[in-house]
Amino acid sequence: MFEANSLAVIFVALMGFSILLYAILDGYDLGVGILLPLTQKDDSDTMIASIGPFWDANETWLVLAIGLLLIAFPAAHSHIFKELYLPTAVLLISLVLRGVAFDFRAKAAFSHKATWNKVFKVGSLLAAMSQGYMLGMYVMGFEDTLAAYIFSLLSAFGVAAAYAYIGACWLIMKTEGALQVQAVNWAKKTGILCFIGIVAVSAVNPLINPDVYAKWFAWPTTLYILPLPILCFALFIYSLMQLKRLPAKHDKGCWRPFVAAVVIFALCFFGLAFSFFPYIVPGKLTIWQSAAAPESLSFIFWGAIIVVPVIISYTIFSYRVFWGKVQELRYH
């Protein structure tokens, strides 16, 4: 049906789609966890309730992305996770801590609830920072240098700030009253940190990768790709303007900062994808060099046709059912 080269492009696009959805969907619920106040019991319950129906299902996209990497690009999977073994272990432990804390905060004795809130917050922060560290090492081409480690640590804080930003925007859309006002303040502060992080990665990436520099600044490609950073900057300005007007009467426009954050995430992802394509391991392996056998790709292609629409349908359905302002958290 498709040639081997075409199948490789299809699967890397599908994997990229999964990573983007994970960054947006699990990004906001990690952000809510990072922002979780430890001294405001009612607010912490409301914040947990805002992500309660979604947070577990959001991680499905991470599982799908890693599964596609393993099955469709086994050579790249081996190389990437050999380089990122420790941060991957931290990520998995952090996600487990979040899951345990989410359930135990309700089932444990009242005096222990604050402890499980702390575990949920720490797990969320470590998960976000481990992802940021992995992104930094990926951008640096997995270099074993002091500069690479420093940049990766800065990237870890940048991704945590980005998740906190989209998490705050989610809370603006889902909550009311004093908590919504607090979420607006969080969004203003974390939005600035997120913007600084994006500028830093955008500046460092072409400087350390000659191929990326050539891609972005080759004429006439520059003419076509230049709107990407301009639009991203414009969206930050737009979001800040909207935040200054919130909370508004009848909650008008409460969804706009979140939509702006989603588009910013998408633009940043497309910028990274454009920078490195067709390499799946920067400077070392292209998607065609690391792709599985054509027969294997053809076989799993049919599985993907069934599985991916099912996941998308379930995701849309769950958000449709639980849309609107947050209600009291209930455990079943």
Image: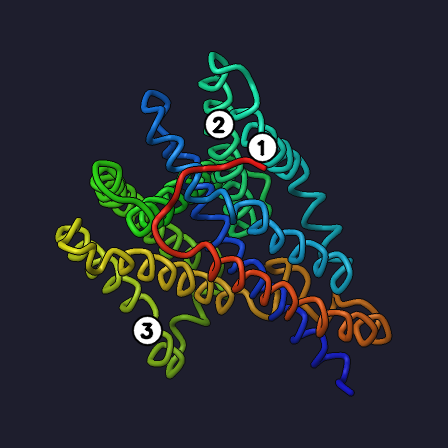
Foreground residue, 220 or 3? 3
Quarter of image, res 308? bottom right
Q: Earlier in the sequence, mark 3 or mark 2?
A: 2
Q: Is residue 243 above or below residue 298?
A: above
Q: Residue furthest right?
A: 295
Instruction: Tell me where residue 222 appears, x and y as whole percent.
Output: 36, 76
What is the x, y in percent for residue 15?
63, 64
Q: Residues within 10 Å of mark 2 (few under 14, many from 20)?
A: some
Is there a contact, CB below 8 Å, between mark 2 and mark 1? yes
Q: Mark 2 sits on what residue?
A: 122
Q: Earlier in the sequence, mark 2 or mark 1?
A: 1
Q: Is residue 82 left or right of residue 268?
A: right
Mark pair 3, 1: CA separation = 37 Å
The total number of labels drawn is 3
Quick one: label 3, few (<14), some, or many (20+) residues within 10 Å? few
Q: Quadrant of residue 179?
A: top left
Nearest to viewer (mark 3 / mark 2): 2
Check the picture and name the quadrant holding the C terminus. top right
| Distance in Å between CA atoms under marks 2 and 1 | 8 Å
Query: Left or right of 274: which side holds 240?
Result: left
- Say which residue appears at 70% left-offset and 67% top-offset: 307
| Front: mark 3 or 1 | 1
- The amino acid pointed to by label 2 is Val
Residue displayed at 77% across by 70% down: 303
Q: Amino acid at mark 3?
A: Leu
Label 1 crowding class (10 Å Cα cut-off): few <14, some 14-19, many 20+?
A: many
Name the mark on residue 94: 1
Instruction: Between residue 16 and residue 325, name the one nearer to us.
Output: 325
For marks 3 and 1 on the same chain, the one whose residue lies earlier in the sequence: 1
Report the residue that reaches farthest toward the top.
111
